[in-house]
Image (spheres, rainbow, N blue to C red):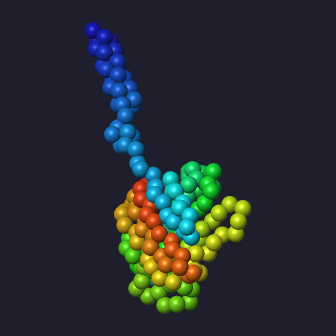
Amino acid sequence: MKNATNYKFVALLLLMTSVALFTSCSDDDETKKLASGSFSFDGTTYDVNSGYIVDFGAGSTHFNYDFYLTDGSVSLGGFGVEVENETFELYLELYSNGTDGFTTGTFQYVPFGEDRTGLNYFDQLDLELPNTADIAIASLIESGTVTVTGSETNYTIDLDLDLTENRTLSGEVSGEFLLRSAN
């Protein structure tokens, strides 16, 4: 009788364990919306279907996140971020004021060497196109801002920049960004 009870107990325990292991959790079923949207530069619209962030952490006064927007397939690989089949990549190097973590807000262009005290700023913004020279858009900026809202890895990036020769860079990309630490 005791062996039969032990057998039933073990069988019940195995059944409960297998149910727990093979039942999906609600978190597993939720699909996150990858970063998507579009931006326009110099008369061309670029459709974004993914993005990633490289977290460079805190410097002496600011926290640095580099955002990348692309139409390629993005994944985190053993050696960092892997992007396949892209036709462009827009690179934004953003510095939020303070060193406790990246904070969202409005970022303005501040060239190298100028005072950045107390500001959310960026000093690099490049459009990378395969088989051509990168376009250093930051060097073309006359006015405007980059606004980042959201938290964790779910962000919205609004681009509203006036450039030389009556050109603009504008658009919005929002959703889930892959995050990789540079350290």
Residue 104: x %, y % from top left = 38, 71
Q: As rendered, which of 170 and 150 lies closer to the eye? A: 170
Give coordinates of residue 133: x percent, y percent.
70, 69
- Residue at the limit of the structure toward the right, as seen here: 131
Q: Where's the N terminus, which quadrant?
A: top left
The residue shown at (47%, 82%) is 143
Q: Residue at point 37% right, 43% down?
A: 30
Q: Tell which residue pokes out farthest to the top in this image.
A: 1
Instruction: Give 37 or 175, whichever is nearer the viewer.
Output: 37
Q: Position of residue 169 (x, y in %)?
A: 51, 71
Does 131 sit left or right of 38 as displayed?
right
Q: Position of residue 12 (x, y in %)?
A: 31, 20
Q: Is residue 67 above or below residue 22?
A: below
The answer to whether any part of residue 181 appears in the image is no
**93 on left or right of 31:** right
What's the residue at 58%, 56% (across, down)? 81
Q: How many marks?
A: 0
**Residue 73 seen in the figure:** yes
Q: Is residue 64 left or right of residue 133?
A: left
Residue 140, quarter of the rendered image: bottom right
- Quarter holding the C terminus is bottom right
Residue drawn where x is 39% and y is 40% of the image? 28
Tell which of 169 and 2 is nearer to you.
Answer: 169
In this picture, is 103 found above or below 30?
A: below
